[in-house]
Amino acid sequence: MKLVTKPPKQVEVDKFSSWALQNKLSSWVLQNELPYYLSNSSLTIEEACATAKTKNLILLHITSNEVFNCGKYGQFIPESWYHDPKTERGRKETREELVIFNSLVPFLLIRVPTWFFGDCLPFTLPSLVAQIKHWKEGDDLIALYPDLVGTPTYLEDAAMIIKSLIDLECQGIYHVTNGDAASELTWGLFIADYLNKSKAVFPHPDQIKNPIHPGLDIQKLLKTINYGIPRWSNATERYLECLS
């Protein structure tokens, strides 16, 4: 049996995760006449800030710019620290966040991870699920990296958490994830076991060049909301149940 040396297509959801969450939350915000303005992809961040200020609303901005290469596996990045890939040094905020801070508009800024999955995100977990689900004996093995780490997060859980933050009238920066990190291999094996295709997934034989992909720290979130955040394994299982 041939081993696939090229892993499945990497998650590419910076825009899609923000779009899916905004789409899920916008009708809820409008129906409840909440004082929030959701930024969207059709506006620049400068235009979104100006619109929120003009309408006298709180800017709700969702961004998916998780940190790479700034810590060891298991290290979680706090809300106040971010990473500049050009200089390989830490910094406190991204350009869009600087725009928000300097606009002086009240805001709720949500950072979500890049390992995001849900019904509205066909480019993420569903592609890996489909690859494993349709695998059969004799097919190439699916090689996944044991040293590529992320925080798998379910769209439904993220939306629920953000609604809780809005209900609590929170402002500032919050990280929203399913809490704990997993390697690409660990996540793939979990999916394969659930689908009874455990033979499909194999550790990738090569080391990834940039293996460190720490998660987003949610300690501030845990201190704010009054319920436990489901783990990625629980979230993935619930999503897989929805697909079956």
Image (cartoon, rainbow, N blue to C red):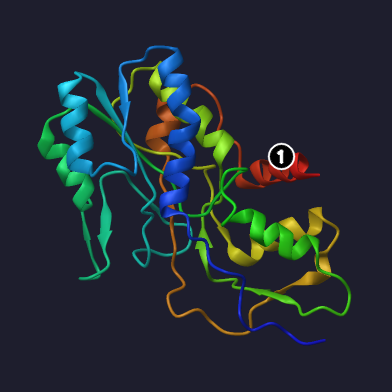
- Rendering coords of residue 152 (x, y %): 56, 51
The residue tagged 1 is 238
| 227 lies above or below 79 | above
- Which quarter shows the N terminus? bottom right
Can the viewer see residue 193 in this picture? Answer: yes
Quarter location, residue 51: top left
Q: Residue at x 49, y 40 (%)?
A: 20
Circle 1 sits in a helix, a strand or a loop, which is it?
helix
- Identify the residue at horizontal 50%, vertical 31% (top origin): 24
The answer to whether residue 225 of the structure is visible from this angle is no
Query: Residue 57 location, x and y as percent?
Result: 24, 20
Determine the residue positioned at 44% across, 63% down: 213
- The quadrant of the rendering that contains the C terminus is top right
Instruction: In the rendered view, tell whether residue 59 sits above or below residue 62.
Output: above
Which of the two residues, 227 or 2, is positioned nearer the viewer here? 2
On screen, residue 139 versus residue 176, left or right, reads right
Mark 1 surroundings within 10 Å by alpha-carbon count, few (fewer than 14), some (14 through 19), many (20 or more): few
Counting from the top left corner in percent of width and height, residue 125 is at 62, 55
> In the rendered image of this protein, does residue 183 appear above or below residue 225?
below
Which of the two residues, 158 or 28, is positioned nearer the viewer here? 28
Residue kind at label 1, given as amino acid type? Arg
- Judge left or right: residue 95 versus residue 127: left
Task: Single out the residue that lies furthest toward the right.
Answer: 137
Quadrant of the rendered image containing residue 189: bottom right
- Please name whichever residue, 204 or 13, is drawn nearer the observer in this view of the structure: 13
How many numbered circles does the render carry?
1
Residue 53 relative to residue 193: left or right: left
**Pick the front one: 211 or 136:** 136
Determine the residue located farthest toward the bottom in the rendered image: 2
On screen, 207 above or below 163?
A: below
| Residue 190 location (% of width, % of height) | 72, 57
